[in-house]
Amino acid sequence: MSSPTFRLYNTLTHETEPVEPIEEEHLQFYSCGPTVYMYAHIGNFRSFLTADLIRRTAEAIGWDVTNVSNITDVGHLTQDDLVDPGGEDKMQQALEREGERFANIYDLARHYTEAFLEDWRALNLREPEVRPRATEHVTDQLRAVVELVESDHAYATDQGVYFSVESADDYGHLSGNTEAQQLQASERDVVEDPDKRDPRDFALWKHDPDHLMHWHSPWGWGYPGWHIECSVMGMQYLGNRFDLHTGGEDLIFPHHECEIAQNQSLAGHRVINYWVHTRFLQVEGEKMSKSKGNFYTVRDLIQPSPEDDHVPASVRDQGGVDPLALRYALMQGQYRKPFNFTLDTLHTAARHVQRYRDAAERVEAALTADADGPDELGDRLGDIYDRTLEAMCDDLNTPAATAAALEGVKAIEQMDRMSGASARSARTWLDRTNALLGIIESTFEADEQTDTASETDPTSDSLADSIEELLADREAARRDGEYARADAIRDTLEALGIEVMDRPEGPEWRRKVELR
């Protein structure tokens, strides 16, 4: 069978369209990543999962994929539903909240970045080709701001540099929100810059010499606005024309609307053809909220602590759920429809994932036995895979895809005696289904098992002494202001599987937690 046409809903055109890459059979896309001021919750990961499934589907039909997904570690303000938000930077606010845990704001950013990457691997998400951090590209952002000022798309005031929305064509086309900010400041409780030319104009650079993360610019000490980072990093790594951009529906306005205005002003033309947005997640029929006790991070569910009272006892008592069960549960709602996440859905997902694993064990046993007989599964499983792929190509219809794939498990379960030929077909089907959906075996778990079998235990006495020496060298480098050397030592420790936690009283280390 020829590959089905890959179709996705494009927020820009409000239509489900065939995805036609600019470069034939090479999908290039940007995924908005997290702001690393807290542990990411399951709603965040529903959006990241959408990007992962786009990648897997594109690869399944034979395309190459280049994906860039950022880490926001500066510039994201607390009132992020406004075109030009006020309030504190979320990173700085987090340090004020958790200051005793971290020596400085950079250590806080590292901690939550590392935690995010652990959760990412636990949910079996494919790694992007590039994962840039906003703080590593401030110079690039400044160059873009200078260019926008010089081309009259931006202007400076005493408080910062603002993008002039009036200078951009079709501002508001993505969201339809062309006049959303023409409201009185008193109604929004926003501190406005009186020198702004238009209430819709948004900040490219904030003048603030007292911010804990600040850089020197032509307009004085300060830090970048949130929106400029994604425009700059997307075009730096993917060029000034690329295929697709993903994110949660909360990013349509203002973040992605502002990105489009910046992109087109910098490039002189449309940069991105398709915009794909994931709808909000509810938990047990209600909006996820800490006050309601239904706010779950990924690690709440896969690594709960006994004192996590908000985590249901059915999850705590079993030491957390299988991460692939959580992935499976999040796939039970199609990405662009609101989804109600429930514990029943999660427990059902756990049973289904276990069925796949039991089927895989039966297949492995049959492969070992390699009994004679015809292939009674090949054609049937091939048809099931084709229908699974067709569902994924139909705007990531994950409920239909997982339902089709379960028929393959049933087919294996119904075999009284499996021949070697049938087992080989079943193994091929399991591998292809896992590559497409990622719900049977974690790529990272397989890699970790291989690495563990060939490496020395990094917490042995001899290596413990070496780790202490490396930490001492790192502290000396930090005292001398040799931050590049200090970061290189941290990278060496991470390669050994050691997590470093900088405390006010000095660094501590531990072996990274192994994920189930």
Image (cartoon, rainbow, N blue to C red):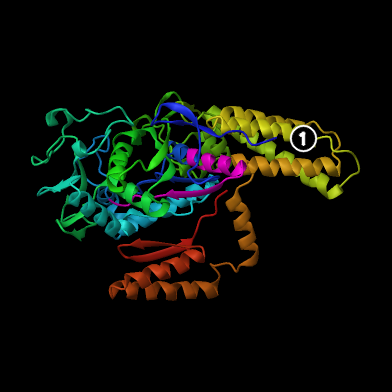
Residue at 50% x, 46% y is 23
Question: Disc 1 designates what residue?
Answer: 412
Q: In which quarter of the image is the N terminus?
A: top right
Q: In this view, does 11 lie to the left or right of 93?
A: right
- Amino acid type assigned to the residue bearing label 1 in the image: Ile
Residue numbers of the magenta segment:
50-74
- How many badges with numbers are in the image? 1
In this rendering, position of residue 14 left or right of residue 182: right
State the image coordinates of residue 215 (x, y, percent, origin top left).
22, 59
Q: Is residue 141 above or below residue 433?
A: below
In this view, the residue farthest toward the top is: 285
Q: In the image as oriented, which residue stretches furthest toward the right?
A: 372
Check disc 1 and report its element: helix, strand or loop.
helix
Judge whether residue 88 is colored magenta: no
Q: Is residue 351 in view from this perspective?
A: no
346 up-or-down from 138: above or below: above
Give the quadrant of residue 507.
bottom left
Q: Where is residue 430 in the image (x, y as percent from the top left)?
A: 70, 41
Is residue 136 something one can see in this rendering? yes
Find residue 281 and report its horizontal and vertical position in percent: 43, 30
Is 73 one of the magenta-colored residues? yes
Observer-nearest of 423 and 117: 423
